[in-house]
Image (cartoon, rainbow, N blue to C red):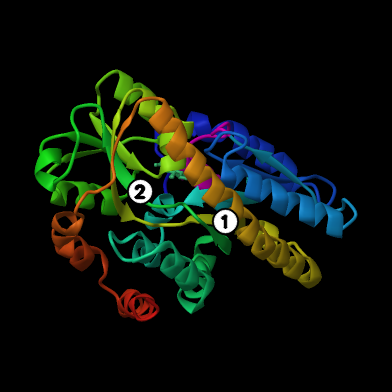
Amino acid sequence: MTINPTRRAALAAPLLLGAAACSQEIGERPLRGADTHAAGYPTVQAVDYFGELLSQRTDGRLRLRNYPGGQLGGEGDTLEITMFGGLDVNRVNLAPLNVIEPTTFVPALPFLFSTTDHMRRSLDGEPGRAILETLRPHGLIGLCFYDSGQRSFYNRVRPVRTPEDLRGMKIRVQPSDLYVAMVSALGANPTPIPFGEVYQALVQGVVDGAENNMPSYDDTRHHEVARYYTATGHVMAPEAFVMSRRTWDRLTPADRDLVMECANESVPYMREIWDAREASARQNVIDAGCELIEDVDVEPFRALMAPVWERFIVSDLQQRLVRDIQAME
Ligand code: GTR
């Protein structure tokens, strides 16, 4: 993977940090992690919890220093840093992983999962494990998936009830071809922008809207600018918690088991916080005066997604994963 010049500056500081870190043994320094979300967001809390478990179970020998709020850069950048070993762990959405590993398109397919329960069972089960395993050749160990709810469209222009209402709108998407194709298929104009820059893009009218889950819509204050939220729930792609393979390879087998154990235990913890946060975020945005369009008929949206599935699901492995997930409904 090549790093373009504009990203070099963003990468430089943490890479230096990483170089210094690499000369120290694991255990002499804390493991370092990153999250694009602010402190207190459920993913950050889950990874902090993972760190606490790890520290308790090793009497502080293994501990974590997590850098939330996108301090170390956008998810694409921090993922590269993790692949190079400059960060030990990272919590990212599936979208930046789409760029490096095609199996990760599967759980990001629009309207693949029918319910939250279907999504959780699929990712806890064999399909989820198989997808995490495909990250290994890219220098990443997939530790676990966390919930990311249902992504839905919001905008500052008008209430959206049909794909027709979205037509021509400039919609921010995550930097992933799948999201670009999805929004194009709905007749809108996709604009890939890193998460941390979306608020300004909305304020300045660079984009008319975006799509995300309710806690992100609330937490980022996008709802202050884009008042219309339509519960399309089109994507239920999870969050991924990964470890750099370089770090993993330096752990003892017993420590690897412990890392996996603590990651797995952080999943139910995260889900509990997540469910509560979804409810409180919904209430917050209602209180803030946003218009929630929750009785939307999603069938016309779903009907336009066939070409997206066809374009991104091409290999035997991807097709098998899709079939297995559908069979678990
Ligand atoms: C959030 C997700 C972030 C990031 C963000 C985005 O739901 O938790 O990791 O992917 O969406 O839209 O960029």
Ligand 1's quadrant: top left
**Residue at image coords 41%, 36%:** 217
In the rendered structure, does residue 305 fall within the stretch colored magenta?
no
Residue 289, given in percent of the width and then of the height, sits at 35, 25
Q: Nearer the viewer, residue 35 or 83?
A: 35
Residue 14, given in percent of the width and then of the height, sits at 61, 36
**Residue at image coords 46%, 52%:** 148
Name the amino acid type tagged 1: Arg
Identify residue for label 2.
151
- Does residue 26 appear anywhere in the picture? no
Q: Quadrant of the C terminus?
A: bottom left
Q: Is residue 84 above or below residue 204?
A: below
Residue 21 horizontal side relative to residue 324, left or right: right
Q: Nearer the viewer, residue 62 or 248?
A: 62
Residue 79 horizontal side relative to residue 56, left or right: left
Q: Is residue 212 above or below residue 286?
A: below
Magenta part of the chain: 69-81
Q: Are marks 1 and 2 in contact (CB under 8 Å)?
A: no
**Residue at image coords 90%, 54%:** 59
Residue 27, given in percent of the width and then of the height, sits at 83, 52
Within 8 Å of ligand 1, the CB of disc 2? yes
Identify residue for label 1.
271
- Name which quarter of the figure residue 118 lies in: bottom left
Residue 251 horizontal side relative to residue 43, left or right: right
Residue 13, given in percent of the width and then of the height, sits at 60, 31
